[in-house]
Amino acid sequence: MRHEIHTYSALLRQIHNDLRVQHPEWIQPNGESPLCDSYEARLMKLLDASRPMESNENIGKGAKNSETARHFEFAKASL
């Protein structure tokens, strides 16, 4: 089933869910998936790199503290 994604957090949620559906072997018995998390982090870095810089305040902070990472953590929390 295909549906439109209208928000950034919905896109991140869809990516999160799709990775786990496509690769159930990556899911550990406790429900965690370091490999999926790694792919999601790499995607966030690519998305951040493709966005124009609004200010220099994020330089050197890395993807963990980026706006994309904050959006993704918010989206993951609502899963």
Image (cartoon, rainbow, N blue to C red):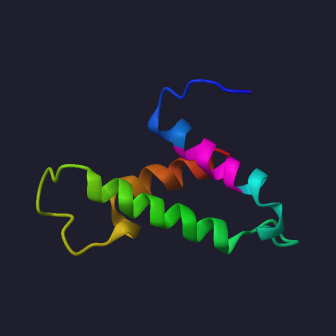
For this rendering, which residue is in front, 29 or 74? Answer: 29
Q: How many marks?
A: 0
Query: Residue pushed farthest left?
Result: 56
Identity of the residue drawn at 84% across and 71% down: 30
Report the side of 52 relative to 15 (left or right). Answer: left
Residue 78 lies, with reference to residue 50, above or below; the image says: above
Q: Which is the main secondary structure of the residues drawn in magenta?
A: helix
Q: Which of the 4 image quarters holds residue 19?
A: bottom right
**58 falls in the magenta region:** no
Residues drawn in magenta: 12-19
* The N terminus: image quadrant: top right
Could you tell whether 8 is left or right of 78 in the image?
Answer: left
Note whether 10 is above or below 43 in the view shown.
Answer: above
Q: Position of residue 49 (x, y in %)?
A: 28, 59
Q: Is residue 36 left or right of residue 56?
A: right
Specify the quadrant of the image occupied by residue 20.
bottom right
At a point 80% along the width and 67% down the height, the residue shown is 27
Query: Between residues 3 and 69, which one lies in front from this camera angle?
Result: 3
What is the x, y in percent for residue 37?
Answer: 60, 67
Q: Position of residue 9 (x, y in %)?
A: 50, 40
Q: Position of residue 21 (x, y in %)?
A: 77, 51
